[in-house]
Amino acid sequence: MKNLFALLVSLLAAQAATPLRAAADQFLEYTEVFVRGTYTKPSNNGLSIGDVQIIIPAAALDRFNQAVFLKPKFKWDYTVGLNYRFPDTRTRFFVDYDHFREDASRTDNSILDIGVVPPPGLNLIPVFEYASLLYATQEIRAGFKRLIPFHHRFLVDLGAFLEYDKLNRTMREYINGEHPAEGAPVETSFRETDNIVKAFGPGVGVLIAGIPFKSCKYFGLFGGVATSLLYAKNRFDESNVVTLLNGTQILEYDYNPENSYSILGKFDVNFGIDYRRSIPVSGSKVNTGLTLGMRYVNYINAFKNGNTYFNPFPSTDDFAANTGHAEDFGRFGPYLQLSVGGQKTY
């Protein structure tokens, strides 16, 4: 009786496992998931934190100064994504999410910044204490791709998508002035500048891939470019707080213009080498891929700096008379990607 019961259970389990296994095989055949470790660095301009005096001036208006900059570094981050190929077609739906966050800082002396430039009669020395920078970006894309094979070792992949981007750049700067005889700070100044961009719009892309050497059928080369046209909302805020020697705080200014709206152009270059092979897993073959690539992405005129070229001087010298021109934002660097599922495309 026990043997008969065990046989019935085995038969029922086999019947239930068959459709489940078929569904799993079909899922792995049509669906590819990937995770990517990115190692990128911001490439934009606009990171001057003041200037240093390289020659003692002969007159009050003769500065002989050299600008100094914050220098971002490479940073590890990640991208995750999914591709689903519609059965019996070469069309795929895809969605991916890219995350990036990087900070940099610098401490130095004798940097003129934030208007803390005392009159010559007081004989005060501006001493820069600290500056920090934070970049944070998020990118979400969703759309469709279409494979066009020209040869069993060469294909073109066309894509169209919608994307949402959020960019944030925050700079914090602190400076003080010292009297050389007493060595005590007589004035400190803190400035914080925020540029926030939220953008949404369509994009298109093309990628060329193939196996250059017949003897290395598992290795392929690829290269492509995508471009987007994004409708963006730009928010800018800058404030400066001055603290006197007696501890009194004075809010010198809080510059917060209305949100401005613009159209941004974005382009994305991607190339590298990948290794793709089907491996047996529980009686089925699963496609796996390992990719080593390089990516460069750039947003044209992304940070608007308030969209106001010139701000009139108030009664104090601590005001940012010119918040700067619009600036690009870009990132570049290598990445390593692991993918599972889907079909080999070449």
Image (cartoon, rainbow, N blue to C red):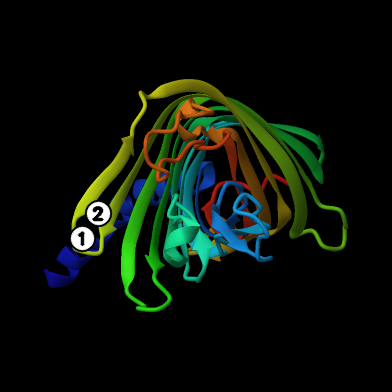
Amino acid on which disc 1 is placed: Val
Image: 74 above or below 23 = below
Mark 2 falls on what kind of element? Answer: helix
| Residue 181 visible in the snapshot | yes
Q: Residue at x 68, y 59 (%)?
A: 58
User: Which quadrant of the rendered structure holds the N terminus?
Assistant: bottom left
Q: Residue at x 38, y 64 (%)?
A: 176
Residue ID for mark 2: 12
Could you tell me residue 246's position as x and y percent? 19, 63
Residues at circles 1 and 2 in contact by the CB criterion of under 8 Å: yes
Q: How many marks?
A: 2
Q: Residue 66 sits in which quadrant?
A: bottom right
Q: Residue at x 58, y 34 (%)?
A: 325
Could you tell me residue 101's position as x and y percent? 44, 55
Could you tell me residue 318's position as x and y percent? 40, 46
Residue ID for mark 1: 9
Q: Nearer the viewer, residue 202 or 319?
A: 319
Q: Residue at x 54, y 55 (%)?
A: 50
Image: 250 above or below 322 = below
Q: Residue 10 sits in which quadrant?
A: bottom left
Q: Residues within 10 Å of mark 2 (few under 14, many from 20)?
A: few
On screen, residue 43 versus residue 78, left or right, reads: right
On screen, residue 39 versus residue 126, left or right, reads: right
Q: Residues within 10 Å of mark 1 (few under 14, many from 20)?
A: few
Amino acid on which disc 2 is placed: Leu
| Residue 159 visible in the snapshot | no
